[in-house]
Image: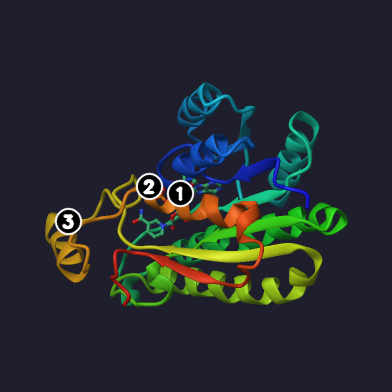
């Protein structure tokens, strides 16, 4: 059975994406480290992946822009080989109560978290179908399952991503390709940095594990789903949230 050789992780300049790229590098994959604006962060991840003995390149890709996605895939195909593992990790979040939420921010959230993941999957699938092997892992959120006041746009985008995951899993599951979603709980990254101390305390109280998750704990599950042992896991929505959604 063919195995994953080349992975593209979007939004891998920091946080969960960076940890995922490193977990895949440790598993022996060549990794393309996608980034939108944080080139230094991406280069830092590349250096760490190379220190693990992996081939790695930093790859500019704005998932809101179809041309940027196509350019990135072409470059990865040329520099590392065809993409066998796609991790749709790039994400955008801006909290705000619905009554005051701007249409522009709603659109940015859906375009990044949902439309962007679809565009990347659509670009990745033809080569995976041809190879009859592929792995797509969508990084959703516990917010897809459990609503949060102030997160209507974010929750909707991640719930949409879960729906897309299940439909794609059915569409391509007969061709050796799996499509799964991982739903992290609260992980301290740049995305969650604006949370107030009170909100963080509340999350810890609500989480049976009694603590936040780490990027490495999310990355480990994504790396498993990307690997050869996970061939019979398809269309799954796996919470990695310390029990928050239980
Ligand atoms: N942290 C949590 O508690 C948590 C919980 C549940 C789910 N998640 C999900 O996990 C994923 C990673 O989140 P994180 O916490 O690691 O966030 P983060 O540290 O803010 O990282 C977000 C990444 O997404 C990239 N990005 C943003 N907009 C992009 C775009 N239009 N095109 C391409 N890349 C873009 C950023 O790239 P640049 O910096 O280069 O612009 C950055 O690398 C997200 O999908 C998030 O929704 C996070």
Residue 102 at least partly seen: no
Quadrant housing residue 204: bottom left
The residue located at (21%, 69%) in the rendering is: 208
Disc 2 residue: CB within 8 Å of ligand 1: yes
Reading the chain from its start, which is encountered first: label 1 or label 3?
A: 3
Label 3 crowding class (10 Å Cα cut-off): few <14, some 14-19, many 20+? few
Is the C-beta separation of discs 2 and 1 under 8 Å? yes
The residue located at (80%, 32%) in the rendering is: 78
Label 2 crowding class (10 Å Cα cut-off): few <14, some 14-19, many 20+? many
Q: Which residue is at the front of the view, 227 or 118? A: 227
Q: Secondary structure at mark 3?
A: loop
Reading the chain from its start, which is encountered first: label 2 or label 3?
A: 3
Quadrant housing residue 176: bottom right
Q: Secondary structure at mark 2?
A: helix
On-image quarter of the C terminus = bottom left
Quadrant housing residue 173: bottom right
Q: Is 39 located above or below residue 102 in the figure?
A: above
Q: Position of residue 20 (x, y in %)?
A: 49, 44
- Cα separation, mark 1 vs mark 3, equals 25 Å
Task: Say which residue label 3 marks.
Answer: 196
Task: Say which residue label 1 marks.
Answer: 219
- Tell me the number on the disc at residue 215: 2
Q: Is 145 located above or below residue 128 in the figure?
A: below
């Amino acid at each position: 059975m063919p195995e994953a050789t080349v992975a593209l992780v979007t939004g891998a300049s920091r946080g969960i994406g960076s940890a995922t790229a490193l977990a895949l590098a440790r598993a022996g994959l060549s990794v393309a480290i996608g980034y939108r604006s944080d080139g230094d962060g991406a280069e830092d991840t590349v250096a760490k992946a190379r220190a693990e003995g992996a081939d790695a390149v930093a790859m500019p890709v704005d998932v809101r822009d179809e041309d940027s996605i196509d350019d990135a895939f072409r470059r990865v195909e040329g520099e590392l080989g065809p993409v066998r593992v796609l991790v749709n990790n790039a994400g955008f979040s801006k909290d705000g109560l619905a009554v005051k939420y701007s249409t522009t921010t709603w659109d940015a959230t859906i375009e990044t978290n949902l439309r962007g993941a679809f565009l990347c999957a659509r670009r990745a699938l033809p080569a995976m179908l041809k190879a009859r092997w592929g792995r797509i892992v969508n990084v959703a959120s516990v917010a897809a399952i459990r609503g949060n006041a102030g997160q209507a746009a974010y929750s909707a985008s991640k719930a949409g991503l879960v729906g897309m995951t299940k439909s794609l899993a059915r569409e391509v599951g007969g061709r050796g390709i799996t499509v799964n979603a991982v739903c992290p709980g609260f992980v301290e990254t740049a995305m969650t940095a604006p949370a107030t101390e009170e909100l963080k305390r509340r999350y810890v109280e609500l989480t049976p594990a009694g603590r936040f998750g780490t990027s490495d704990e999310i990355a480990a599950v994504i790396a498993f789903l990307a690997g050869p042992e996970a061939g019979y896991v398809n269309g799954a929505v796996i919470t990695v949230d310390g029990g928050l959604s239980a």
